[in-house]
Image: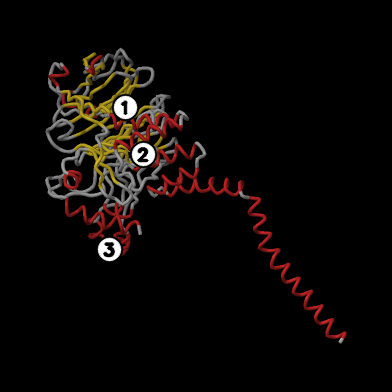
């Protein structure tokens, strides 16, 4: 039944989509931030984030303009820009008044190796000890340098019998855990993440993407000729686009875009959360899978589903995904519920031409635009701050305070489903189950409703157990007593007849 309503919503909204422009623009005027409700309808929302500042090369005070920048990394108050076209890394520091100042340009290093410069670097990660791990794509290596830019080691092409021995090693994106193990995405290698131990030894592949295929093609392959087989594509896993290591050591990997078939079947896996075993443990309890926009325009060069090119994860487990196709940012909570969606393609502040990377510093978001060669800094609005405060208070166990914050969120946006669910969860943790049921019912949150109802039923039974027992006794004993009385009366009547 729900899918039927979703289909109706999709049909009505499809009429309003024109030339690939934002669904929100068509359905809600000029709204910048939006969300989806239970039925799949687009809901206008107060801005969760606002573009505070756009940093260009001149405003950053760089010695030369950025050229095709591809990567961002944040460590504390330091921001690292991978200036791919200029073969360097720019280390910057955030100071007072939200200013970014250049700390140093990293375009070479010291060490006893043949080549001490970079060639088309695409990513960087900094360990807790301050060591730099750089994906030096053009030189077919991953470098490990200390904070003084001294060469420590390098990670080369993995040695594996299943790989083509003549493959060109092109490390593209990487992440490093607390034990200095390196996880890498390499162009042309679709077996998952390449894992290196701290000593540089390749130890296998992690989290290979599931193969997606059509059964009709599979059957056709069984009967096709060799010539026909050569024209068919192979059933091979797709490569990951980007990865991010969160504060708990889990790897979030974005898989580019979901297929049309997966979207229709609601099996899309555009984002994965990988544990140490490489298993996907991403929670998706939202009304829709995590894949960005529900509805796609057709035109303007922006067709098809959202294409996640990067992801960043905050301390409260909220993760923001960057859509390269339409230049949007989608934020999800730890349950996979959509919190906000905003952005678009364009030249105005808060819009992008070719977004390539996203990072966070606290709750602030930084988005790198490879074509515009700029960094946009987004800060939370009053609405966004209140939502985060409600979540933080809940995590700290301050459920009453969390509920009050969600009440304030509801005043700012009465259509925000997470506010109702948040208030319900606050009531649930305070053992106010009847109140929790009301809020969960309003937003069709079946999972939390079941939890609250189970506890509410348990307490109701405990409080009314005496009445229940008496009622059951009455039900069973009264008919039995009546039947017994009738039986005795019948026996007496029969005895009287025989006496006569």
Determine the CA span between mark 1 and mark 3: 55 Å
395 to 2, vertically: above or below: above
Q: State which tag comes first along the sequence, 2 or 1.
A: 1
Closest to the camera, between mark 3 and mark 2, is 2
- Report the residue at 64% width, 50% height from top: 465
Q: Which mark is residue 154?
A: none
Determine if residue 113 is in view.
yes
Q: Residue 87, located in which quarter of the rendered image?
A: top left
On the image, numbered disc 3 is attached to which residue? 224
Q: State which tag comes first along the sequence, 1 or 3.
A: 3
On the image, numbered disc 1 is attached to which residue? 363
Q: How is the image coloured?
A: secondary structure
Extreme-bottom residue of the structure: 500
Compared across the picture, whether 223 is left or right of 451 comes to left
Badge 2 marks a residue whose secondary structure is helix
Question: Which quadrant of the figure contains the C terminus?
Answer: bottom right
Question: Which quadrant of the figure contains the N terminus?
Answer: bottom left
Extreme-right residue of the structure: 499
Q: Residues within 10 Å of mark 3 (few under 14, many from 20)?
A: few
Closest to the camera, between mark 2 and mark 1, is 2
């Amino acid at each position: 039944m729900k899918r039927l309503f979703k289909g109706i919503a999709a049909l009505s909204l499809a009429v309003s989509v024109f030339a690939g422009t934002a669904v929100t623009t068509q359905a809600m005027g000029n709204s910048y931030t939006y969300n989806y409700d239970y039925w799949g309808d687009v809901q206008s929302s107060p801005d969760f984030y606002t573009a505070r500042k756009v940093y260009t090369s001149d405003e950053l005070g760089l010695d030369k303009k950025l050229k095709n920048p591809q990567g961002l990394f944040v460590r504390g108050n330091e921001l690292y820009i991978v200036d791919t076209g200029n073969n360097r890394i720019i280390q910057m520091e955030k100071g007072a008044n939200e200013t970014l100042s250049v700390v140093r340009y990293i375009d070479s290093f010291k060490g006893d190796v043949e080549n001490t410069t970079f060639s088309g670097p695409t990513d960087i990660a900094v360990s807790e000890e301050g060591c730099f791990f750089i994906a030096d794509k053009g030189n077919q290596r991953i470098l490990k340098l200390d904070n003084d830019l001294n060469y420590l080691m390098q990670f080369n092409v993995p040695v594996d019998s299943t790989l083509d021995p003549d493959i060109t090693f092109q490390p593209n994106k990487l992440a490093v855990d607390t034990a200095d193990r390196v996880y890498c995405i390499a162009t042309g290698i679709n077996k998952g993440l390449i894992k290196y131990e701290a000593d540089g030894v390749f130890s296998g592949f992690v989290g290979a993407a599931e193969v997606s295929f059509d059964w009709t093609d599979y059957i056709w392959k069984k009967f096709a000729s060799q010539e026909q087989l050569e024209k068919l594509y192979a059933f091979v896993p797709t490569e990951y686009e980007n990865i991010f290591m969160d504060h708990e050591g889990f790897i979030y990997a974005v898989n580019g875009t979901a297929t049309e078939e997966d979207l229709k079947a609601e099996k899309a896996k555009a984002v994965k959360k990988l544990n140490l075993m490489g298993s996907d443990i991403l929670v998706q309890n939202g009304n829709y899978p995590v894949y960005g926009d529900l509805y796609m325009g057709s035109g303007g060069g922006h067709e098809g589903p959202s294409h996640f090119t990067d992801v960043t994860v905050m301390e409260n487990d909220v993760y923001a995904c960057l859509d390269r196709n339409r230049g949007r940012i989608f934020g999800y909570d730890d349950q996979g519920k959509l919190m906000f969606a905003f952005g678009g393609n364009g030249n105005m502040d808060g819009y992008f031409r070719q977004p390539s990377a996203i990072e966070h510093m606290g709750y602030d978001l930084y988005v790198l635009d490879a074509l515009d060669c700029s960094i946009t800094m987004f800060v939370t609005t009053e609405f966004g701050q209140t939502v985060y405060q409600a979540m933080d208070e809940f995590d700290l166990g301050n459920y009453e305070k969390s509920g009050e914050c969600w009440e304030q969120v509801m005043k700012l946006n009465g259509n925000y489903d997470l506010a109702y669910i948040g208030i319900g969860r606050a009531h649930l943790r305070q053992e106010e189950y009847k109140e929790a049921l009301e809020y969960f019912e309003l937003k069709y949150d079946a999972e939390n409703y079941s939890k609250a109802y189970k506890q509410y039923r348990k307490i109701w039974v405990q409080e009314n157990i005496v009445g229940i027992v008496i009622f059951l006794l009455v039900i069973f004993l009264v008919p039995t007593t009546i039947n017994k009385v009738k039986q005795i009366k019948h026996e007496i009547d029969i005895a009287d007849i025989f006496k006569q």
